[in-house]
Structures are given as structure tokens and as C-alpha cells.
Amino acid sequence: MYDKVYQGLGQALKTDFYELTMSAAYFQNNIDTLTTFELFIRKLPDNRSYLVFAGLEQVIEYLLNLRFTKKEILFLKRMPTFKYVKRDFFDYLRDFRFNGDLWSVPEGTIVFENEPIIRVTANIIEAQIIETFILSMINFQTLVATKASRVVYAAKGKPVIDFGSRRAHGPEAGILAARASYIGGCIGTSNVYAGYKFGIPVYGTAAHSYTMAFDSELESFKKYYDTFPETTVLLIDTYDIEEGARNAVKIGQSLKGVRIDSDNIIEKSKKVRRILDKAGLHNAKILGSGDLNEYKIDKILKEKAPVDMFGVGTEMVTSRDDPALGGVYKLVEQITDDGIKYRAKFSIEKATYPGKKQIFRRYDNNGMMKEDILTLANAKKPQGTEPLLKNYIKNGKLMKKLPELSQIRNTTVRNLKKLPNKYKNLYKVVHFRVKISPELKRLFRKLQNLYT
């Protein structure tokens, strides 16, 4: 489905070194238990009340295609750390496949802190090796999808386009950010590869350098329009923005719009709108860009600036106000010859609940999210709730067809409509209620008494 930049092929060494040293130690000591890990966000960023889950499709592609190549295995063999590791371990890596199970909430699901959004059950080495890739993929795309949803919410129905590739942390991050931004509600991206690979609508205008390459601004506008007569949006603030607007209207009634990429967009957009309207270009749109975020967009619209759509880059694809998401991947259960052994951490502020778990979501009479209930996976479904975790991979095989990206985006839209507005407030954090079932609490206390 995807090329090697997203598949597991050639991805095996994109991991932390300790995943491989632990795996070698498991192998050397004949530890081969069926093990369950869960991925969750321990704490939401300080100014977020929810998260939009994203990145699952790339995780699934990785797991289905994960292989170690001969060159990768040879590289590991030559590392001093592996000097005393049995040759059999490298033979194991040669034949390595993910044969486990993956449970996950669907992409576009609204999730909250301390909820297991991915659950992996597999041989302990399989479950361990994949930790780094899964965390990096989910942390990044969920971070950006959430930020995008806030930007889109601030825009109040006006279209938002991802303009962030050049400010992303590398070209691949720009591609994944475009995907996550689309999931979060953007209508498209400036990233051409993301359009090619994922089918995301692609948008763009021209840079200041294009205007500067001609002897006059008007000449640059005319040449651009002659090349793209049906889609021309002109960047008008290379020199004087009002003069740029007056030059733009000389193109004629078929001009689609103008772009303002400057500070003080509120005042400038009002002046530009008057110039466009005076020339009869009432349908020409104003696209605003330039270090925008949800707070600036909210202010622009509160000041009734006539901006019709927004191009958002740096602030969105880096989630600049909260640039990292603290997702963790923790061992919760092992099956040994002695039966199930539940695992948990008890350290203050880093405690984890043991056992395979399920999230059940309850809605109020108006269909709005009311609360989540965290239970053991084999517990009885609480009345009036729906389970969020679904089985995507079983015994290394894909269990269900993955949705198209547009369907994932629609899932986000539907779920955000079911999230009460108080959780979408841009300036105030409101904590969603996540209840821990009595059975889960009892199991935690039992283990705590056993180990402390």
C-alpha cells in the first residue's frame, strides 16, 4: 500500500538501542512469555483538554512488514555490545516477524490521559522491539492532529490549510504532519508528496521571490494569471499591500483571491477587502497566513477581519505551544507456566494499572460524551456504553480493512461534535471524567500489597 518510507522494510533499526539489548537478553535467558504492553498518554499537555488519536495506519503497516535485513543484522553483530550474544539470536532476527495482536482505538477518536489507546499482545521480544516506532509515530501524529483540531475550531468553519512543511522537523515529519493536520480537520496541505501519497487536496499560491523576479509587481501577477487562469490567488504584500491589492484587481473579475502573509492582518485585510469590493471582486477570497495559530485566528475573527481562509504552518506542524506528547508504552501482563502475572508500577506520579484493559465510553441523552470507564478487558460491558478498543491485528494478520483518510477525517469531525464545547475552550483546561472500575482498583491494590 505504501512505499518503504512508511513500511516496516528498512525500519527495523529505527529504534532505541535498549530495545535490542533487552531483546537479546530475553533470548539469551530463554524468556519467551506472551506479553501485553499498553500505550497511553500519562498526562495531557498543560493547555489541552483532549487529544485526537492519529498515526495508527503507519503503525499497522510497520507491524505487518517489519523485517531485519542482512546488512542490518551484520551491523548489529559487529557492535561490541553484542560480542557475547549467541549466534542464534541473529538467526532469530533474520526470521523475525510480528505475530502478535494489536488492539487500538480508531484514528480520529477523542482520547484522554491514562487511557490505553493501543494494546499489544505478543511474544515479549516482538512486543519490545516495536516500542520506539509505535511511540514516536503515535506521539507525533496525535500531537499535530490535536493542534490542527484546535486551529480548525478557532476558524469557526472557515477553511484551514496546512502550510507547514518547510518548518517541520524534517521532510518526513512534514509529510506525516500533513496527514495528521488533515485528520484534525484541515481541508488540505501545501505538501505535494502528501497529496500524492495520501490523496490529500493540495493548495498553494506563489512566494515573494516570484514577484521579485519580475520588473514590476503587476507584470508578475499577469504572468501568473496567464499560467493559472482558473485558480489564481495572488500574494499581494511583497511591497506595499494596498498597491498590491490595486494591482491584483487589474487582473479582472475571474481572480480567485489574494493572500496576505504579514503581521497586522486584521487592519490590512479590512483595507484589502474594501479595494476588492470597490473593483467589484466581491467573490474574491482573502487567504491569511504568517505564523498563525488558534489564538491569533480567534482574535482575527473576533475583530471581524474579512479573512475567508487560513494557511497555518509552523505553529501547527510543530505544535509550538506544546511541542511534545508524553506517550508511554508499559508492560501490564505476562502469561507464564504459572498462569497470568499482572504487572504494574507503583512509583508516585508514574503508577500504572495492571492487566489488559478496555475503555468504555458513555454518552448523555443528547449524544454528547459524558464519561469514560477504564476496566479489565474481560470485564462485563457497563450498561449504556460502547467499547473503544478494536482488534486490528490477530496473530500477525490484519483483521479489518483500514479506512480511507477522508473517512478518518470525518470520524474526527463526528467525534468532536460529540465533545462538549467546554473541552474545546482554547483558553481553559477542563478535565474529562475517566473512571477506574472497582475490579481494576482491587487488582492494583492487591499487586501493591504484594510488591511493596
Image: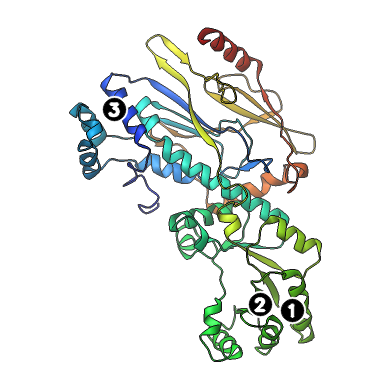
Residue at the location (30% across, 40% down)? 67
The 10 Å Cα crowd at callout 1, few under 14, some 14 to 19, many 20 or more, is many
Mark 3 touches mark 1? (CB < 8 Å): no
Residue at the location (39% across, 43% down)? 62
Residue 388's spot in the image, x, y percent? Answer: 60, 33
Residue at the location (56% across, 25% down)? 350
Circle 2 SS class: strand
* Mark 3 residue type: Ala
User: In front of the other: label 3 or label 2?
Assistant: 3
Residue 82's spot in the image, x, y percent? Answer: 23, 31
Residue 450's spot in the image, x, y percent? Answer: 52, 7
Residue 290's spot in the image, x, y percent? Answer: 63, 66
- Judge whether 152 appears above or below 201 on screen: above
Circle 3 SS class: helix
Q: Mark 2 sits on what residue?
A: 258
Circle 1 SS class: helix
| Label at residue 167 | none
N-terminal label among 2 and 1: 2
Distance of label 3 from label 2 (alpha carbons):
59 Å
Mark 2 touches mark 1? (CB < 8 Å): yes
- Judge whether 443 appears above or below 278 on screen: above
Distance of label 2 from label 1 (alpha carbons):
9 Å
* Mark 1 residue type: Val
In front of the other: 411 or 32: 32
79 horizontally vs 36: left or right: left
- Judge whether 26 appears above or below 155 on screen: above
Distance of label 3 from label 1 (alpha carbons):
65 Å
N-terminal label among 3 and 2: 3
| Label at residue 24 | 3
* Mark 2 residue type: Val
Q: Mark 1 sits on what residue?
A: 272
Residue at the location (62% across, 16% down)? 441
